[in-house]
């Protein structure tokens, strides 16, 4: 009986796999250079609950945290803009 290699690389999707029992599981790493804000966490919850395919695709491609941070930054920018606009109208 031939022993299976403990690690393999798939050149089609550029993922490495590790043998766990009888199955090869992908070696996935979550790379987050900065913490996710309130709006990014809300987007992650939405993706998990209502768009699981998109969530998986972003996670597997390594783009999930970039997407979450982008959404968080844009939402925060809009919130700051609305706050500034509201404070201008309170003074008038």
Image (cartoon, helix red, strand yellow):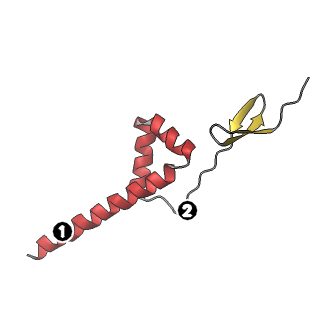
Farthest left residue?
92
Give the quarter of the figure containing the N terminus: top right
Between 3 and 52, the one lying in front of the other is: 3
Farthest right residue?
1
- Marker count (numbered): 2
Q: Is mark 2 on a helix, strand or loop?
A: loop
Q: How crowded is mark 2: few (under 14 residues within 10 Å), some or many (20 or more)?
A: few
Residue positioned 73% across, 33% down in the render? 24
Residue 79 locus on image (x, y percent): 28, 62
- Residue at the spot of label 2: 33
The answer to whether 19 appears left or right of 57 in the picture is right
Say whether disc 1 or disc 2 marks the residue closer to the N-terminus. Answer: 2
Quarter holding residue 37:
bottom left
Q: Is mark 1 on a helix, strand or loop?
A: helix
Q: Name the mark on residue 30.
A: none
Residue positioned 55% across, 58% down in the render? 32
Between 81 and 87, the one lying in front of the other is: 81
Residue positioned 55% across, 62% down in the render? 33
Farthest top residue?
1
**Mark 1–mark 2 CB contact (< 8 Å):** no
Q: Residues within 10 Å of mark 1 (few under 14, many from 20)?
A: few
- Residue at the spot of label 1: 85
Residue 73 locus on image (x, y percent): 38, 61
Residue 25 locus on image (x, y percent): 69, 36
Residue positioned 83% across, 35% down in the render? 5
CA–CA distance between discs 1 and 2? Answer: 32 Å
Q: In this view, does 19 lie above or below 73?
A: above
Give the quarter of the figure containing the C terminus: bottom left
Quarter holding residue 16:
top right
Residue 4 locus on image (x, y percent): 84, 31
Farthest front residue?
11
Q: Which of marks 1 and 2 is in front?
A: 2
């Amino acid at each position: 009986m031939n022993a299976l290699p403990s690690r393999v690389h798939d050149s089609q999707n550029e993922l490495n796999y590790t043998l766990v029992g009888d199955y090869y599981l992908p070696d996935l790493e979550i790379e987050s250079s900065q913490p996710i804000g309130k709006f990014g966490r809300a987007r992650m919850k939405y993706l998990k609950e209502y768009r699981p395919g998109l969530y998986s695709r972003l996670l597997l491609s390594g783009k999930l945290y970039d997407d979450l941070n982008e959404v968080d930054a844009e939402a925060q920018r809009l919130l700051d803009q609305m706050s500034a606009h509201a404070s201008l109208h309170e003074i008038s």
